Image: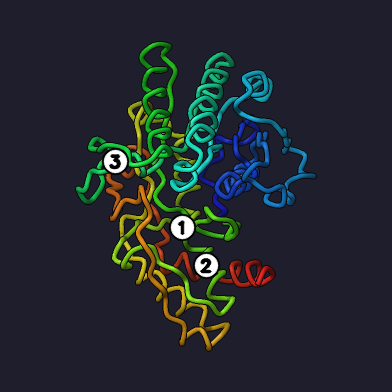
Amino acid sequence: MKTTKFNQLKNKNVLVTGGCGFIGSHLIKALLEQGAKVKCLDNLSTGKFVNIKEFYEHSSFEFIEGDIRDFDTCAKAMQNCDYVSHQAALGSVPRSLKTPLNTHSVNVTGFLNVIEAARLAKVSRFVFAASSSAYGDNANLPKIESEIGRPLSPYAATKLVNEIYAGVYKQSFGFDSIGLRYFNVFGPKQDPDGAYAAVIPKFVSTLLQGKSPVINGDGSFSRDYTYIDNVIEANLLALTTPNKHALNEIYNIAYGERTTLVELVNLLKERLLNYDSSLAQIKPEFGPERPGDVPHSLASIQKARNLLGYNPQCDISEGITKAIDWYYENLKINT
């Protein structure tokens, strides 16, 4: 994603935690394109060095290998920073059910280390990745930021605690922040491998192997799939907004439409038929529902529109079309 409307980022020092991950690496690219000086802090536990390889020789880029669970590491990385984008986290609902202590240590202790280091360093803008999982068992659609339910997984609980801590830091220390609740982000660089892979690259990888993708449940569960460019735009808006009323708020970052899992598989097959006509014969298989899964997710993005000027341009159909070339070339290698 290239844009020139964030010129105020030029020569600003920005720390991106989790910058070797899917979203973080896209954000680093956008920040460098705006002329920012970027530090990337990542322990490479889930992020991959290959995601930042293209920036490594850039004069305005610095990679710091380190863990956000270590406060001294966070404090050192924070030196001379103007802005912080906290993307580092241990994602996945299923993973959190298997290793709740590890999820807590990264997502809660790590978050607290980062925000405290940012406060002490007197950074002027702190933006963090929240999650739509915070809506929990609230079945109302669309999801409105002020109406959440009970978390359904350790992962959801940790991301909700982040929001609580951000509010406490404003109340106790006057430290401003902005939280962005992501809804099912997808796009190039998203890893299809492993037990906790995101559904879109996992389905594409499975289809390219000539196998049937396995849908958890009956396929009626729906999500507000959000192309990566929309998410990066939201992050840049949050980092640069001059609107004081936009600070210390939580925002849904999505497209505002939902797609069922069956519809998703059909859409992926349709786009991939351009590469392999035999995929038309493949049908999905259906397995048990996953514990902790929310049946339906659809965001209201009106708050982000009003206060941040967020205006997502890429729906799931266009996003899949944009991403499919990358998916085909990169995921095919592993088949």
Amino acid on which the number 2 mark rests in the picture: Lys
Q: Residue 200 carries which label?
A: none
Judged from the image, the secondary structure of the residue bearing numbered disc 1 is strand
Of badges 1 and 3, nearer the viewer stands: 1
Reading the chain from its start, which is encountered first: label 2 or label 1?
A: 1
Judged from the image, the secondary structure of the residue bearing numbered disc 2 is helix
Q: Residue 199: x, y in percent?
A: 47, 60
Task: Read off the residue under disc 3.
Answer: 303
Task: Read off the residue under disc 2.
Answer: 322
- The reply to whether discs 1 and 3 touch (Cβ–Cβ < 8 Å) is no
Residue lying at 65% horizontally and 67% vertically, measured from the top left: 330
At label 1, counting other C-alpha atoms closer than 10 Å, the crowd grade (few under 14, some 14-19, many 20 or more) is many
Residue lying at 43% horizontally and 39% vertically, measured from the top left: 155
- The reply to whether discs 2 and 3 touch (Cβ–Cβ < 8 Å) is no
Task: Read off the residue under disc 1.
Answer: 227
Reading the chain from its start, which is encountered first: label 1 or label 3?
A: 1
Amino acid on which the number 1 mark rests in the picture: Tyr
Amino acid on which the number 3 mark rests in the picture: Lys
Q: Image quadrant for the C terminus?
A: bottom right
Reading the chain from its start, which is encountered first: label 2 or label 3?
A: 3
- 210 is higher (above) or lower (below) than 308: below
